[in-house]
Amino acid sequence: RRHSRPILANRLLAVMVCAAAFIWIARHIRLRSPETERYFLAVDDNSGPMNLISEVADGGAIAMVARTKNTPLPVSLRGRYTRFMQGDGVLGFRDALPAIALVVRDVRRILRCNADLEPQLFWRMAVLPFRRIVIRALLARLRPTFYWGRDPYSPDHILRRQELHRIGAESHSILHGFGALADLYPMFRYISFDRFYVFGRVIHRIYQDTWATDMKVVVGGSFSFTREEFAQLRNAPRHGRDIAVFTNVMSVANDAVFVDLDRKSTRLNSSHVS
């Protein structure tokens, strides 16, 4: 049975999303089609490790896309690359009406199918059409050949891949962590990139039933290693079956890692003895 209070609240939220989208579109309209800058690579600038940029800098122009104005840009990159905000996209006058129609159509569909959801959950769904237009407008301005994302936990990355395909571009990313407290994490259940780099094959085996079937999963190891460090690791002498563990400052997670490794090591040794 549907409850009237969530339905009324969600109808109001739907109107608010549409109104916010209309205002944003109106502020980003250009009378003529926007001039594209055609970048080789657009990078999700989340203030994380940026060693990737120096490795592919010879491919062409690179745009840094910051999530917020407060996202610090590493000192080594300042002045070397053009920086944009996620909301810096523009729409040509001919693109404005189709964008408005898309928002209205998709918000109505979401409301029709999910009107009785809790408003907090409904809001997260209702803003997706608006987010799509923001992404579309930015890509229309940058026209990247590749986009390096760092947000596999956000539905934005799925929308972005769809919009990148509209302009013949590709979406790449990396799984920048692996949970020690559980095998399955809800934020990593649904992932869709063209190419997705992971630490090891076991991660793909765990999530392959819900990851995009057309996504190329590449086992790449640590994303922070340089070419020189990989060479050192490859040439380093190996002794026994020792395992090096690098963890963060979360003591609870660290304990879980070592307990799991100890259990697996015991099981492995037992199988060799038998």
Image (cartoon, rainbow, N blue to C red):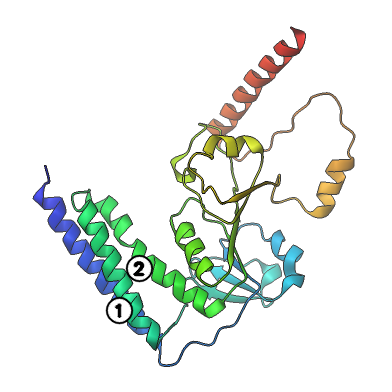
Dot 2 falls on a residue whose secondary structure is helix
Number of numbered discs overlaid on the protein picture: 2
Which disc, if any, is residue 226? none
Q: Is residue 17 left or right of residue 141?
A: left
221 lies left or right of 214: right
Residue 109 spot, x, y in % from top left: 25, 60
- Asked if disc 2 and disc 1 are in contact, CB closer than 8 Å, the reply is no
Q: In x, y percent, where is residue 110?
A: 26, 58
Up-down: is 37 above or below 197?
below
Say which residue label 2 marks. Answer: 130
Residue under pointer 1: 23
Q: Nearer the viewer, residue 73 or 120?
A: 120
Q: Quadrant of residue 172?
A: bottom right
Quadrant housing residue 7: bottom left
Q: Position of residue 162 (x, y in %)?
A: 48, 63
In the rendered view of the protein, which quadrant contains the N terminus? top left
**Residue 87 seen anywhere in this rendered image of the structure:** no
Q: Is residue 250 left or right of residue 50?
A: left
